[in-house]
Amino acid sequence: MISKKMHEQVQNSSVIRAMFEEGKRLAGIYGAENVFDFSLGNPNVEPPEDVKRAILEIVNDENSIGIHAYMNNSGYEEVRAAIAKSLNEKHGTVFTENNIIMTVGAAGGLNIILKTLLNPTDEVITFAPFFGEYRSYVKNYEGELVVISPNTIDFQPNLEEFEKKITLNTKAVIINSPNNPTGVIYSEDTIIKLSEILREKQKEFGTDIYLISDEPYRELAYDQAEVPYISKYYANTIVGYSFSKSLSLPGERIGYLVIPDQAADYENIISAANIANRILGFVNAPALFQRVIAKCLDAKVDLEAYNRNRELLYKGLLSFGYQCIKPEGAFYMFVKSPIKNDAEFCSLSNKKNILIVPGSAFGCPGYVRIAYCVAYETIKNALPGFKALIEELK
Amino acid sequence: MISKKMHEQVQNSSVIRAMFEEGKRLAGIYGAENVFDFSLGNPNVEPPEDVKRAILEIVNDENSIGIHAYMNNSGYEEVRAAIAKSLNEKHGTVFTENNIIMTVGAAGGLNIILKTLLNPTDEVITFAPFFGEYRSYVKNYEGELVVISPNTIDFQPNLEEFEKKITLNTKAVIINSPNNPTGVIYSEDTIIKLSEILREKQKEFGTDIYLISDEPYRELAYDQAEVPYISKYYANTIVGYSFSKSLSLPGERIGYLVIPDQAADYENIISAANIANRILGFVNAPALFQRVIAKCLDAKVDLEAYNRNRELLYKGLLSFGYQCIKPEGAFYMFVKSPIKNDAEFCSLSNKKNILIVPGSAFGCPGYVRIAYCVAYETIKNALPGFKALIEELK
């Protein structure tokens, strides 16, 4: 009785979420401390103290009348202005509140912008490995996701194949840097070349191609690595941002879209995105957390905690003979599976109570993703298992 | 460059929201105190004190680790269990946490269930006058909204026409009681007859027809009026609930779906609805407010404030010669336009700084909706304008 589309979705239900459930099941049997769950990007680092302080300030304010009421679909004007100002200071951009729409996380923002842009059969390009949800988001609006095969040398986008796969039907390109699942930051050189290709193709086809930059991991960059701000390189950029990771607030569903003035059809995109926000049922980003994040724009989670995890896991895995490149951002490590079949390797690791996700779920078979946003002890205690795994396979 | 569908939406952008903007414009010119904005269902009554207390308790709890993290897409198990228990106590139902999915308001819930159920060209029936957003929600999933014409005698659903319009393609029926825009409560007699018709038609066509009950106004019923709990009358019921009005939290986007065990294809609907929650970009209902509402299930806004407004407005309008039936719930009055053209009447009222919405926006021309969730003084000060309006039209 459910729809055909959803029937398919139920059949192929998210591998990652299935892992999450498997983790809970194993924890029930062996005890949570004996299960090493690296399957989900659920930050273990607590939000900075500023978040609690902001909540208390707002709620205890004697003038707090109407703080839970409806506001414009785009969000509070003063919150959007504060975000624009903060972006301008960090990146030398010139945004105003009119370029910002508050959204129910980045997932909400991506759905809004895809609903705004896509006609049926429009193509949206992304680069493997990629966050598997993009496939569903694009399908929601009857677009076609076109996947560029992975460059497994350094996991920068494969621009040669990209150039060939842009067609008259290409409406948008989604990038994600720092990247889930690789932790790679797309270099400035990559962004310059990618933008150049897009400009040429726009000219060749007489179309507008939007570059949608999905940036939940922007603030999680190690060793002071630079994450280029995409709108400075390409006019038709739309940014989807989330505070889920930068402030460890994934359950609160708070983020925003940036739609720069110079994006083609700017006025209509803004109007349509506001309507899409409403009719998709989001209506507006949660009210209290709009005000909370406005008070926390300079705050950041303890990145050093993730960095310690990164170092421990990376050194450990390398010493056992695993192959992977060192992540520059986010909290994922994308490791080459010691056997060809990544799903089989994940099943073997499950037997050691280690939960990881096959690269196939990200369009990159032969690899596995390890989410290291977990307790340091979890990594420490899981390392013997990782060691045993690869040794048994030799 | 925006999609064709969204281009249409931008052209016909919500009348109600346009009013909201017009109100802000007029307030800028004449001062907020001289503009009588009855256009939007934005509760003016503050949330009960329990809400603030709950927020402080949760945030100040020393064991508040992970309160902003991801949880299952369906929401916290203990919150869902608390809701099930509360419903069972109030309505004699037998729900468990497995019947509840937490959603981003009722608008989020309706989108989730329509995505779950609808194949393209499936028909969804609703009764005029109806909340205009249903049209967009159904269109989001390529369904066809079939509107039953209004019964302007008492605004109970027109069941004769309903029976005739049910076809093999009817997948769902949306009802909304207490009703936006009339304030009418669908009587038990109505619900019994409507259920009977549905059961017969299910048998006749060999189909399942889901009755979706959109219930944001359930707790706003005056004079101890009973609002029948629909799942007790019809097995294939799905309830969409919101705390937006019962606790005055519309900006926080918190509600839930009830999917009873006896609904046909229950298991698949639950699985699919959880996936729809995720892939539509909601992911989960806001974390903090899930815990907040769980602590406030017995709390309620000050209904007497709305009741005072209702009495003042109803008596005032009637004494001037307006025609309308007295609302039994919600905070809307649906008044017959003194001239045939309801949009023209709204334009005339605008000139007296009175903002109201044409009935055409609810599929019922010739009427206007007055949202009386405003300050008592606003109604008092607007009454002379309402009087002058009808006198000038005589």
Image (cartoon, coloured by chain):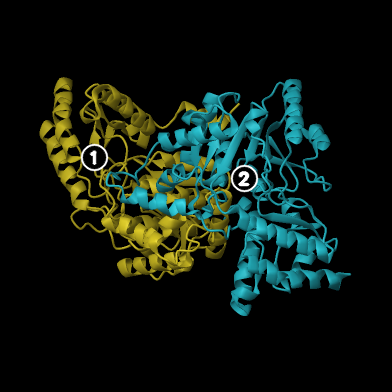
Chain colours: A cyan, B yellow
Asked whether, in this view, residue A280 is left or right of residue A221, the answer is left
Disc 2 to disc 1, how far (Cα)?
Answer: 39 Å
Residue A391 point in image, percent of width and height:
85, 71
Given the current orientation, which residue lies at the most extreme right position?
A394
- Decide which of A52, A150 is in the foreground and name it: A52
Q: Position of residue B150 (x, y in %)?
A: 32, 40
Query: Image point 26% across, 43% down: which residue?
Result: B44
Instruction: Say which chain tag 1 marks.
Output: B
> Mark 2 falls on what kind of element?
helix
| SS for dot 1 | loop
* A164 sits left or right of B16 in the view: right
Which amino acid lies under the numbered mark 1 shown in the image of this protein? Val
Residue at position x 84%, y 47% from top?
A153
Q: Which mark is residue B374?
A: 1
- For the N terminus of chain B, the quadrant is top right
Tell me which residue sits at (15%, 44%) in the image: B311
Residue lying farthest left? Answer: B319
Q: Chain of mark 2?
A: A
**A163 left or right of B32?**
right
Relative vertical location of residue B322 with respect to residue A132 in this rendering, above or below: above
Q: Position of residue B19 (x, y in %)?
A: 34, 30
User: Which residue appears at 13% of the width and 28% of the height?
Assistant: B384
Graded by Cα atoms within 10 Å as few (under 14), some (14 to 19) or many (20 or more), the crowding at tag 1 reads: many
Where residue B78 sits, quadrant-wise, is: bottom left
Residue wearing tag 2: A137
Q: Is residue A214 left or right of residue B210?
A: right
* Camera sees residue A7: no
Is B167 above or below relative to B193? above
Kind of residue at badge 2: Tyr
Q: Position of residue B206 (x, y in %)?
A: 53, 58
